[in-house]
Image (tube, rainbow, N blue to C red):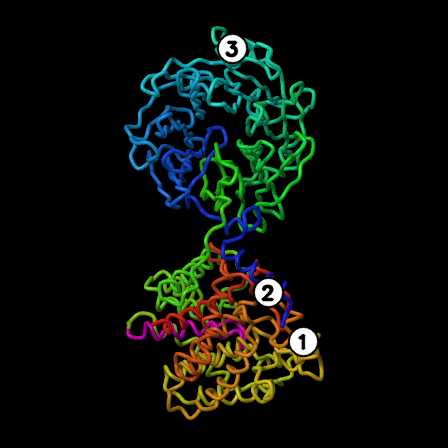
Amino acid sequence: MYPIRLFLSLAFLMLLLAGTSTPGMAQRAESYETLAEDGAWCWFSDPRSVYHEGEHQRTYTGFVTSTGDITIVSKDHRSGVLVTKVLYENVQVDDHVNPSLLVLPDGRLMVFFTRHNGTLYYAKTENPEDITSFATVDSLDLGSELCYTNPVLLSEEDNRIYLFSRGGYDWKPSFVTSDDLGATWSKPQTFVSKKVNNPMNRPYTKVVSDGKSSIHFAFTDGHPRLENHNSIYYLRYEGGRFFDAGGKVIGDTKQLPLVQSDIPKVYDGVASNQRAWIWDLALTQDGRPAMVYTTLPEETLHFYNYAVWDGESWQNTRLCEAGSAFPRFPHPKEMRDPEPHYSGGICLDHTDPNRVYLSRPVADRFEIEEWTTGDGGQTFSSQAVTVRSLQDNVRPVAVRNAPEQLSPRLMWMHLDHYAHYTDYRTRIKTNRPAEGFDAAISPSAIKEVMGAVADWQIGHQHLVKHHPLDWTNGALYSGMMAWSLVAQDEQYKNWLQQIGQRHAWQPFFRMYHADDVVVSQMYLDMYQHHQTEARYPYRMLAPTKARLDYVINHPSEGSLLLDYSDPQTLERWSWCDALFMAPPVYVKMANITGDEKYLEFMDQEYKATYDFLYDKEEHLFYRDYRFFPERKREANGEKIFWGRGNGWVMGGLVSILKDLPKDSPYRPFYETLFREMAAKVASCQEASGFWHASMLDHEAFPKPETSSSAFFCYALAYGVRSGLLDRGQYEPAVQKAWQALVSAVYPDGKLGWVQPIGEDPRDVTAEMTEVYGVGAFLLAGTELLQLAK
């Protein structure tokens, strides 16, 4: 028995993979809940997401899609129901046009958005707390340079709505008001401008309000691309007058615009000789303003900063380095990055501005982090929200009005692609762990998780470094082919067929090497699927037949004493993995052609390897002769039997037995070997359902390993289904194995805990994946499907 802490650790890791980790624990971004598969935003239109509690408890979030659709999502926190509403199609493919949201006193939602330099649009829901139906989308022409929307409603001004934006006539901070909840609007007014108005100068503004009587502003001189000493200013509005942070009157609504040089700075870009850019503004529990911003000493060197008014002065703290701009796109060296100041992004939690969320690069991926202060911003501690993500995570935003325990309370953009604000494919993620897959032995549950794993692998296949005809991919194709025959979706078969056609149905380049013919398993299965058609069949068959014929007619005289410095020792099946790679191809060819020579050769070579590498006491295979017990042993003194190595053998045996005729004289040997190994394999299964990298030394290798577990699950399930194994004895092992395998699948479909390429037991982590592990998982799933039926 292993220590209790080990089982708890494994169980905890499986919960993490299943998406049920405790809040606040870092995980891959891909394992968090996806609010929208297509959505993006800029950070100058807010609120982007707001919580409202009336009859329901709901969070409303707005964004623009990659096709320019203005979209609103409502999440009900009691029922979990998600409602998505496209408010306006094809406004503009530009993340600057994302909507801002305002909850009206009666619970209806009001939405505002503009074109990037264009018309203002707005609409209200017809019913409180219900986004399924909006009234007509109205519009206002407020000038051709209009952009960004920031609505505020002041209850102590008879519910007057203020809508702040970048002015449509002069690019300056401007606003309109409505005293009838948006039925009519005032003329636009600029409220801040420089003494000498430069028409190219365009300050960037953040707005926040207490919702009662005050509105707070933070704004810059302009765009950091155009302002070498871009400073940040603060201003508060209340009762018709404007104040600085200390309460000094700066002006009133009758004296607009205010002169920017009369307004005190929070950050002085001239004195610091560094430009800045504002990112967020919020109010502390006692109503004091706090803000976060970037300083940009160089285009490729950004820093995050925090500022808070302590009652007497602004306290500014540098948090951390922010890296450089996040957009990734190929461009010639002479081309300047068009948006070099696009940091990953930083925001305040408006419920508690002592909490900051930011995005910064870690190991070449922008990850989300949470930073908190307990001493008014003097010092901070930090913890990761996302770690080891596959794609960048940027522009975090905290849900406005969020109760402390609300989940999710944080959202961000998860990038498939972002080259420019007009060229993006991004998702909206939340900090709520996504739900894992159902591990039930039912056709619907099995197909759901298999489809997710297959789709994830196809979607990430461009990142795989192995040659398409390499053995690693050949094993994947075997599993993908099996899945394609039960998936009721032609995309998987088409994907495999395109691979075969692209490579003219050729095996890989080494004539004798078992690894280089495994891809032919898929080719021959595809041939059998298409053999009644007039088009491809012989093209699918001929290259593999020619390869096998040559090997049979010119048998290798190589030794079974594997030595990587002597290629001839790799011409025969001198390592146990080879028993998955090559023998099934010979059996398939025998079935297709009816020629016994393929079976004779396969049986002769298989038994040579069996006689050399099979331990008749342990009923397991040594990986190769270098792992014989007289040469080396496990740390606990046991013989070294590699988990995946024996998984390869068991997986190969299933393929052989599936294709060997029932009356074949060769069959009894393989059935006997299968039963012997199955009994030993089942005895090595952990209570968790997993097997380990080492078959006999779990203490040295305590972590789960999914490629071996998947092959063993595949084999035992086949044995039960075919009647080769006793159902009562082995079906519980199959069920436990499948449940364990499903727990190793991330919510986005990535399969974890796959030991990397190797030849002996090694350490494995939850993040590790490989194509052959996916192939084994899909093979296991197809057997489970048949067993479930």
The x and y percentages for residue 418 are 49, 41
Q: Amino acid at mark 3?
A: Arg
Secondary element at tag 2: helix
The x and y percentages for residue 744 are 51, 62
The earlier-in-sequence mark between 1 and 3 is 3
Can residue 608 be seen in this snapshot?
A: yes
- Please state if 125 lies on the left or on the right of 669 as rendered: left
Can residue 587 be seen in this snapshot?
A: no
Q: Which residue is mark 3?
A: 241
The residue shown at (28%, 72%) is 534
Spatial CA span between label 2 and label 3: 64 Å
Q: Which residue is mark 1?
A: 565
Q: Nearer the viewer, mark 1 or mark 3?
A: 3
Binning the other alpha carbons within 10 Å of mark 1 as few (below 14), some (14 to 19) or many (20 upward) gives few
The x and y percentages for residue 9 are 60, 61
The earlier-in-sequence mark between 2 and 3 is 2
Q: Amino acid at mark 1?
A: Ser
Q: Which residue is mark 2?
A: 7
Q: Which residues are magenta?
A: 507-532
The residue shown at (62%, 65%) is 4
- Please state if 571 lies on the left or on the right of 667 as rendered: right
